[in-house]
Image (cartoon, helix red, strand yellow):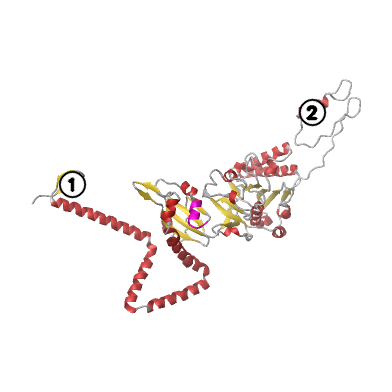
C-alpha cells in the first residue's frame, strides 16, 4: 500500500500514515484545549449567570416531576417577599432588584440590539484585514438618572475619538447628553477588618488601570432641569468636600476648597451668586465658630453681597482704596503665617486661633481691568498675584467671579487651580476658563439655556473630563436667615479706618501772594508726569510772577 501524498504549502512530501494521525490528533487536542479555555474564561466572566442557569435547570426538573404547581407557589412567595422588602427597605430593593432589572433590560433591548449599527454610523468601527473591529460592550449599569456603559476600544483608537462622537452617540441611543470618561469613575473602597489584606489584593486586580476601556454615561433623565433646593448646613465644614449642589448622576457635588483658589465664570444672570452663596452656606457653621473668616469685596456697590453683611468679618463695597487695603492686609496675614509655618508644615490647618481666610470677590474684572485709578489697580493686581501664587497652602484663599474670562481682562486667570464654568456667551470662553480642549471633552457651557441658571461644568479631582452640576438656589430670605443665625465674630484685626484727608498748605510766590493752581479734573491718570508738573510749579519768573 502506497503512502499518501500530503500537500504542505505547495511542497509535495511523502509522509507515512502514523505521522499524519499523530499530527491530526495533536491538532485536535490543541483546538479542544483552546475551546475549553475559552469556555472557562466565559464562565468566570459571566459568573453572575450561574444562579440563573441553575434555577432554569431546577425549574425544568420540577416541571417534569410535579407540573406547574411548584412554579406558581414560587411566584406567589417571591411576589409577597418582594412587596414586604419594598415596604420595609425601599432603598435596598431599588438598588438590588429594580435597577439591576432595568440594567438587564436596557442592555439587551436598547444597546445590544442596535450596537453594531450605531457604532458603524458614528464612525467608531475599524477596518482590518477585510473585516471589522467593533468596540466591545462589556457592561451596563443603570442608576435613577444615568446609564453607565463600559466598552473596550479596538486597537488603533483613543478616547478622543469618543469625545468627538459623544453627541452622535447620545442622540443615536435616544438621549440628549453623553459623557465620555477615559478613567474609572469609582475609586477602590477602603478595606478594614481581618480580611482586609485579601480584599485589597482582589481590589488591586478589579480596579487596575485599563487603558483600552472607556466609560460612556448616558443621561437618561436630566435632574438638572429643576431648581436644586438648599442643602443642609454641615455641623463642621469639611474643607476637602463642601456640598454645593447636585450632579447630573444625582450625586451631591462637593467642592475641595482646601489649598486651592476658585474662579467662577459666567454671563450675566447665569447663577454666579448661586455658587458664591452655596459656598458661604456650606461654611456657615465654621463662620459662626470662628474657624473661617470671610472677607468680602463687592465692586458693584453691594448689590450682591451686602444682604449677608453679618456673615463677613470684613466687607468693602464703596471705596477702591479700602479694597486695596483689604487685599494688602490679606497679604500681611499670609506673610505672618509664612514665618510661623516655615519648616513645620506645607499646608495650613485651620483653627480658631489661625482660621481659614476666604477672600470673596464678586466681580474681579472691575478691580483688574475697569478700575479708573492706575495706582490702586496696580496695588490690587500685585496683592492678588501674591495671594494666588502663595496663599493656597497658607490658608488665605481667593474665590472670585467674573463675566469675561479673557486674559487681558483677568490677568491672573492662570493662577486659579479650580474653575467653574456657568453659562457663557461665546464658544471660545469655555476653553479659556476650563483649559484647552475642555469643550471637545463635553463642557458645552456656551449652550446652557437661560432657564438653566446655576448649571455649570466643573473639573473633578482625578478626571480630565468635566462634569455637569447645578448649584443650589439661595433666596434672599434664606440669606437674611443665614446672616442672623451664623453671624461672624469680631475680627481680631479690625478694618482700617480711613483717615480724613489733610489739606495741603497753599503755595505762595515770592511776593507773599498765593500761587494760582487750578483744581485738577477727575481722571484716571494725570496728563503729564509728576516731574513735569513739579517743574511747572517751581519754574516761576525772576520777578516772582506767575509760572510759565
Q: Nearer the viewer, residue 490 or 137?
A: 137
**Spatial CA span between label 2 and label 1:** 107 Å
Helix, strand or loop at label 1? It is strand
* Relative height, residue 9 to residue 146 (above, below): above
Query: Residue 262's spot in the image, x, y percent?
Result: 62, 48
Q: Residue furthest left?
A: 1
Residue 222, how many percent across, how many down?
56, 59
CB atoms at circles 2 and 1 under 8 Å apart? no
Q: Is residue 274 visible?
A: yes
Residue topped by disc 1: 7
Instruction: Between residue 113 and residue 333, name the one nearer to us.
Output: 113
Q: Which mark is residue 246?
A: none
Q: Out of 228 and 209, give the one closest to the viewer.
A: 228
- The residue that disc 2 covers is 533
Main SS, magenta region, reads: helix
Q: Which residues are magenta?
A: 167-175
* Label 1 packing within 10 angstroms: few (<14), some (14-19), many (20+): few
Front residue of 134 and 345:
134
Between disc 2 and disc 1, the foreground one is 1
Residue 246 point in image, percent of width and height: 58, 58
Question: Mark 2 or mark 1: which comes first in sequence?
Answer: 1
51 magenta-colored: no
- Furthest toward the top, the residue is 542
- Say whether residue 168 is magenta: yes
Q: Residue at x 34, y 57 (%)?
A: 41
Disc 2: CA contacts within 10 A as few (<14), some (14-19) or many (>=20) = few
SS label for mark 2: helix
Where's the C terminus, which quadrant? top right
Q: Could you tell me if residue 189 is visible in this image? A: no
Quick check: 266 above or below 219? above
Asked if 186 appears above or below 7 in the picture, the reply is: below
Amino acid at each position: 500500500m502506497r503512502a499518501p501524498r500530503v500537500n504542505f504549502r505547495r511542497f509535495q512530501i511523502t509522509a507515512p500514515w502514523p505521522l499524519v494521525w499523530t499530527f491530526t490528533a495533536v491538532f485536535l487536542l490543541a483546538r479542544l484545549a483552546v475551546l475549553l479555555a475559552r469556555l472557562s474564561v466565559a464562565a468566570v466572566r459571566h459568573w453572575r449567570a450561574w444562579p440563573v442557569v441553575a434555577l432554569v435547570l431546577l425549574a425544568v426538573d420540577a416541571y417534569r416531576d410535579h407540573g406547574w404547581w411548584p412554579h406558581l407557589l414560587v411566584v406567589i412567595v417571591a411576589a409577597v417577599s418582594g412587596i414586604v422588602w419594598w415596604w420595609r427597605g425601599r432603598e435596598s430593593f431599588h438598588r438590588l432588584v429594580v435597577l439591576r432589572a432595568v440594567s438587564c433590560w436596557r442592555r439587551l433591548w436598547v444597546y445590544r440590539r442596535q450596537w453594531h449599527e450605531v457604532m458603524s454610523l458614528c464612525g467608531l468601527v475599524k477596518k482590518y484585514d477585510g473585516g471589522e473591529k467593533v468596540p466591545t460592550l462589556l457592561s451596563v449599569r443603570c442608576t435613577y438618572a444615568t446609564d453607565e456603559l463600559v466598552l473596550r476600544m479596538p486597537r488603533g483608537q483613543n478616547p478622543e475619538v469618543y469625545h468627538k462622537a459623544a453627541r452622535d452617540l447620545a442622540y443615536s441611543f435616544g438621549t440628549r447628553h453623553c459623557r465620555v470618561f477615559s478613567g474609572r469613575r469609582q475609586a477602590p473602597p477602603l478595606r478594614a477588618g481581618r480580611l482586609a489584606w485579601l480584599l485589597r489584593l482582589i481590589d488591586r486586580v478589579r480596579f487596575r488601570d485599563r487603558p483600552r476601556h472607556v466609560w460612556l454615561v448616558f443621561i437618561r433623565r436630566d435632574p438638572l432641569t429643576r431648581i436644586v433646593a438648599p442643602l443642609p448646613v454641615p455641623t463642621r465644614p469639611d474643607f476637602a468636600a463642601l456640598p454645593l449642589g447636585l450632579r447630573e448622576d444625582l450625586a451631591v457635588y462637593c467642592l475641595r476648597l482646601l489649598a486651592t483658589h476658585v474662579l467662577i465664570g459666567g454671563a450675566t444672570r447665569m447663577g454666579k451668586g448661586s455658587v458664591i452663596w452655596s459656598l458661604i452656606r456650606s461654611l456657615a457653621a465654621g463662620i459662626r465658630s470662628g474657624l473661617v473668616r470671610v472677607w468680602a469685596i463687592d465692586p458693584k456697590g453691594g448689590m450682591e453681597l451686602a444682604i449677608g453683611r453679618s456673615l463677613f468679618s470684613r466687607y468693602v463695597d464703596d471705596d477702591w482704596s479700602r479694597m486695596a487695603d483689604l487685599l494688602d492686609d490679606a497679604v500681611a496675614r499670609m506673610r505672618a503665617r509664612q514665618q510661623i509655618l516655615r519648616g513645620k508644615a506645607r499646608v495650613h490647618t485651620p483653627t480658631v486661633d489661625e482660621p481659614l481666610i476666604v477672600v470673596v470677590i464678586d466681580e474681579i474684572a472691575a478691580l483688574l481691568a475697569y478700575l479708573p485709578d492706575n495706582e490702586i489697580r496696580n496695588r490690587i493686581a500685585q496683592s492678588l498675584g501674591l495671594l494666588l501664587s502663595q496663599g493656597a497652602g497658607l490658608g488665605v484663599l481667593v474665590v472670585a467671579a467674573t463675566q469675561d474670562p479673557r486674559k487681558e481682562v483677568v490677568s491672573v486667570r492662570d493662577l486659579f487651580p479650580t474653575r467653574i464654568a456657568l453659562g457663557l456667551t461665546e464658544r471660545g470662553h469655555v476653553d479659556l476658563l476650563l483649559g484647552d480642549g475642555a469643550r471637545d471633552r463635553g463642557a458645552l457651557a456656551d449652550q446652557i439655556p437661560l432657564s438653566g441658571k446655576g448649571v455649570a461644568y466643573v473639573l473633578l479631582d482625578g478626571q480630565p473630563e468635566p462634569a455637569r452640576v447645578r448649584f443650589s438656589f439661595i433666596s434672599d430670605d434664606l440669606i437674611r436667615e443665614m446672616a442672623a443665625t451664623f453671624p461672624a465674630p469680631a475680627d481680631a484685626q479690625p478694618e482700617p479706618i480711613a483717615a480724613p484727608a489733610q489739606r495741603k498748605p497753599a503755595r505762595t510766590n515770592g511776593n507773599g501772594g498765593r500761587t494760582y493752581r487750578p483744581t485738577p479734573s477727575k481722571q484716571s491718570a494725570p496728563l503729564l508726569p509728576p516731574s513735569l508738573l513739579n517743574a511747572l510749579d517751581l519754574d516761576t519768573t525772576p520777578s516772582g510772577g506767575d509760572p510759565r
